[in-house]
Amino acid sequence: MNYITIINNQTIALSTIPEIDYDTFFELNTGFMIDHAERHCVNYFGYKTGDKIKLICCIADDDKHEIYVSSCLYDNTSVITAFTSKLLCFEKYEREIHENFGINYEGHPWLKPVRYPFNRFDQLKTIANYPFYSIESEELHEVGVGPIHAGVIEPGHFRFICNGEQILHLEIQLGYQHRGIEQLFLEKKKLLQKVSLAENIAGDTVVGHTTAFSHIWESICGFEISGDIAFARTLALELERIAIHTGDLSAVCTDVAYQLGSSVFGRLRTPVINFMQEWCGNRLSKGLIRPGSNQFPFDKALADKLKLVLDEFEPDFNEMCKQLFKLPSASSRFERTGVVSYEDVLSVNTVGMAARMSGLNRDIRTSHPYLCYPELQHQPIIKHHGDVYSRVQIRKSEVQQSIKYIRKLLENIPELNNQYNELKTPQADSFAIALVEAWRGEICHCAITGKKGELLLYKIKDPSFHNWMALALSVRNNEISDFPICNKSFNLSYCGHDL
Amino acid sequence: MLDNIKILFHQGKQFIPDVTKAKVPGIFRGRPVISCEKVDEVKLQDLCPVAAISIDPVAIDLGKCSFCGECAKQFPDKIEFSTDYKLATNERDRLIIKEGDDSPIEVNPATVRKEIHSIFGKSLKLRQISAGGDNSCEWELNASNNVQFDMGRFGIEFVASPRHADGIVITGPITKNMAEAVQICYDAVPEPKIIVLVGTDAISGGIFENSPAIDRSFLSKYKIDLFIPGNPAHPLTIINGLLDLTRKK
């Protein structure tokens, strides 16, 4: 066998991942994915072992609920053929590997820097001299925006090439938020420090990233979670989805100058995040999720409160949605704006909402189930037009779906487990992977441990990693004035990308 | 039209009438109160993920604290986080809470620059810079201006350009990749101007304190006018902090 088959949240001995030569590695992994829309690459990365670089590729099969892991030891002397030459979705991974280790690829269109990490291979490349694509022309002009934007948001630079008001091309340059998180995971030795890091990967996806980290850690330590922990995490993931989707609907309304929708959705988010604070003391759920323990037990009193919050939330939310979607001035801004085709999302390898908007069924909750999702029999919400309207519709439907799931979960609150087993020490020389469907889409964390069970590598892939490219494609041939609404309808993470 | 009025009616009254006296719902990790109880201090100090706890006497530095609450959970007799959300001050030392200390955290009027009251007392326009912020403090800064908290009623608003601003608000530990942009933005703000740090990451670096990817040299060049702790800072902490700084008592 050239690869090993594992499932979500599984830990295996590092030595069981077959090590194959690069040509076989190339044929195997591209072969997995060509003409297989149900398979996608959840992570592909390299790390140094001695003076060689080990490449590990993880391909998920959504129909069979399996992940195929293979590896290759590369001595960094010869030029190798890029996966990108056959499958475009690998371009970002290979740019990252090139940026970190200086591996030279042939058949890659442009090995541009990804995020300018502090430990990059070529220190002469700096964020100030990023090589933008440009077109020589008398008729065209460029518009540069950022890194600091007009609103209270994170930094990133957008470079538009426009023909009059029409966007021909958008290039998104990131890296301003790079804090060296992956390296800090190895340096911070206390578990609580690692959890704090996971909470800080992206402050709007605290539950998603912390859940992924907890699943990895529990898997490496051989810890089985009890029903009450699974319940609390599922509940928190769905509440986070409701809160952020509602906030996004508010932001989309702001960008089409619909004041009523902006205010109403904006205020509707508050009771949901205030409930999180009543539960765990923090509006963005920091402190709620910890590996191997249930920090804030969910009891009957909280359940009654949550039911009340949802009972008040739902009619107001539905009423506002109904009004928004029958408003011609809003629909005319949403429909056929920022379209990304099915072919494009497939070739970019987008995940989460940015895949489901164009008919691509990517939802870890069904394809690689975890926590309480098998019992909830989750059905992904799929739209087909790939425009702003589809993305807004998905948000509306997912909020309603999450409310349904929460009501179902609340019917049966599991008994509190008073005797948690202690977390054992992490297994040595292991590889673990965890996939979580957060509100934005699939989060993938991978960990590799060394001889004493210490972390040798921690690799994070936020859904935004690929989805930024979908935003860049969506604005082509749109008016530049429609950029804000396209951007908000994706609402991607800068810090999750830059790490 | 009728539908719109119906929707407006269904929202009821959302705004918080007095943001200086509002109560936060449920549990909240605000200003800690440390008792004089004898505990294993070394264990307590070692527990903290961000080295915010010092011993002999026991003290918590809210500029470093990530408000995870683990110390209060393991030493409930020693440390308790109160629901007091007024945490902002203009002096870094005032963020250090010592054992037996249960006095409110306030801005020290004696050390506030004179022009702040006279020029920014009735109107303050701020330019926010996220420099490695994880988007949680940014969310709460935005929430400060929503219909519930409505900071705009005090004439405090965020503006798009540093040219229109009276000062900058920094969130995040300031990454190397963002350091130059922070400086350029600050330079573009006309004098007199203030600097406000929001969130633990901005005040001390938080969990990123010793990361090789951050560059905090900007902060050592200027006087910081206001520290607003939190992870993220609560909208009530932000609003009360800014009011405490700019309004004459």
Image: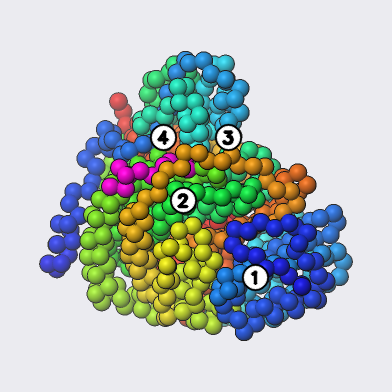
Residue B68 vs B15, above or below: the answer is above
Residue A409 image point, x, y percent = 36, 56
**CA distance for labels 2 and 1:** 29 Å
Of badges 2 and 4, the one in the foreground is 2
Work out which quarter of the rendered image holds the N terminus of chain A and state it: bottom right
Residue type beneath disc 2: Gly
Residue B11 image point, x, y percent = 20, 55
Residue type beneath disc 3: Val
Of badges 3 and 1, the one in the foreground is 1
Q: Neighbour class for label 4 at 10 Å: few (<14), some, many (≥20)?
A: many
Of badges 2 and 3, the one in the foreground is 2
Disc number placed over residue B50 in the picture, else none: 3
Q: Neighbour class for label 2 at 10 Å: few (<14), some, many (≥20)?
A: some
The magenta-colored residue range is A294-304
Residue B128 image point, x, y percent = 45, 48
Residue A437 visible in this rendered orientation of the protein: yes
